[in-house]
Image: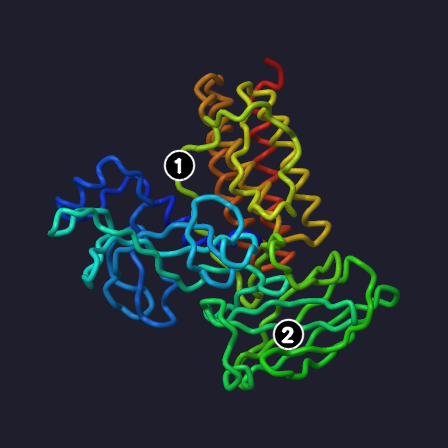
Amino acid sequence: MGHRVLPIVIFVAALSGIGRAAPQSSKAASAAKDIELPPLSYVCIMAGDEDVIEDHPGKCRKCGMELVPIRLDTVWTCPVHAAIHDAKPGKCPIDGRQLIQMTMAISWTCPGGDKEETAPGTCANGAPMVKKYAPRPHGNHNPQHGGQFFMASDNWHHLEGTYLPTGVFRMHLYDDYTKPLPLAQARTISGAVVVKDQRTGEEKTIPLTRSGQYLQGTVGKLPFPAVMYAKVKFKPDAPDNRFDFTFDSYSKEPAPGAAPRTTSAAPTTAPVTASAAPAASSTTASTTAAASTSAAPELSSGVDPALVPLPVPETVPEILSQLRTRTDQIRSFIDKGSFASIYVPAFQAKDLALALDAHKNDLPAEKRKVAEPAIAKLVRVAYMLDAFGDLGNKQQITEAYAKFVEAAKDIQSSFPAQP
């Protein structure tokens, strides 16, 4: 998921739902006819199973309950009040802070009514139904204290690690709505932070002590980038969850009007099975942006760079050149330990590969046989890199990147480098 609020499971489910017919009343269907709606997804409403999101109706794979249709959308909202819903970044009119992105459920209802529809329609009095936003579990993965945000393998606990100028590592604890854990629940959590000595390579373990609703320990002033990892038990008899941190600077509490840092990851307790990428067409391939650039969007701008359309060049040689650049950028992020940023060039490379897919029929048959599976492989591995980037597991990321490079080389060899 560093980065974007939309978790990978929601993102893939949303993409794979494109083009499917959504069951709805004829009145709602008529009103929604000319409105572009987010695809319909099917979710489990059982507490703890909210991460089950499918693109088709059925039963929950965890508890067996019937899945419920829902529409998910990403909106810009105030970081504290969540009362403002906008389609673009900006500042909160309440406190002046930069708007953040959250994934919310959207529905339509009539004033005074308790029935909600998954598409707009008309109320009994002839007035249009009102759009309603509701927070979703895992909908807000934005750091609250200028640190690095993680999701636990239980899909419920969340935490944020900060590295303070005093040399203290502080861990803030949250629930699945990114609300601070009540003190009674925080008391059941224990952990330690591990720092490697840059000279000897020896690891030093510092126990984390509780201070109110967070845990902290003094690691000292380390050279940047400061690399450390935390081991956390969410229950006394539970196994350790590992969370890897790389701090380029000391963490700072966001001030009113300051742009949020959007980084996220998840622990490395178990391997992830990445969903196969759907055969979707690239929306960025038809962008009307002016000139293409080989550099990735600035990551510290406060706007999620993966949401900035990548201007895809018109010619194959230019697309191939940008694909090489994105491949190098992924390698650079891996070397720096900036795992939460990998998804940006990975998804941009995916868009470039899909743009090349439109040119595959121009290739000789023998070249097309190489290009077609290579493009599909690169798209699939881009999603794997995104998922493994969230996990922060360098070994899994490196293995996925090797597959990415293989696919990129096959693509490069299949298409002519010159017009």
Residue at 61% of width from left, 78% of height from top?
Answer: 214
In the image shown, does 226 or 84 lie closer to the viewer?
Answer: 84
**Residue matched to label 2:** 231
Q: Please provide percent x and percent y for residue 38.
A: 33, 45
User: Does the residue at mark 1 contact the one at mark 2 (Cβ under 8 Å)?
Assistant: no
Decide if residue 279 is on the left or right side of residue 25. right
Against 376, residue 63 (above or below) is: below
When asked about the image quadrant of residue 401, the answer is top right
Q: Which of marks 1 and 2 is nearer the N terminus?
A: 2
Q: Which amino acid does label 1 sit on?
A: Ala
**Residue matched to label 1:** 280
Q: How far apart are marks 1 and 2 (CA)?
A: 39 Å
Q: Please provide percent x and percent y for residue 256.
A: 61, 58
Residue at 50% of width from left, 34% of height from top?
Answer: 351
Residue at 13% of width from left, 47% of height from top?
Answer: 126
Q: In which quarter of the image is the C terminus?
A: top right
Q: Within 10 Å of the Cα at label 2, are there few (<14), some (14-19), or many (20+) other Cα atoms?
A: some
When asked about the image quadrant of residue 35, the answer is top left
Q: What element carries label 2?
A: strand
Against 391, residue 12 (above or below) is: above
Q: Is mark 1 on a helix, strand or loop?
A: loop
Q: Within 10 Å of the Cα at label 1, are there few (<14), some (14-19), or many (20+) other Cα atoms?
A: few
In the image shown, does 383 or 132 lie closer to the viewer?
Answer: 132
Against 243, residue 289 (above or below) is: above
Q: Which amino acid does label 2 sit on?
A: Lys
Q: Please provide percent x and percent y for residue 14.
A: 37, 47
Point out the residue furthest to the right here.
199
Decide if residue 297 is on the left or right side of residue 19. right
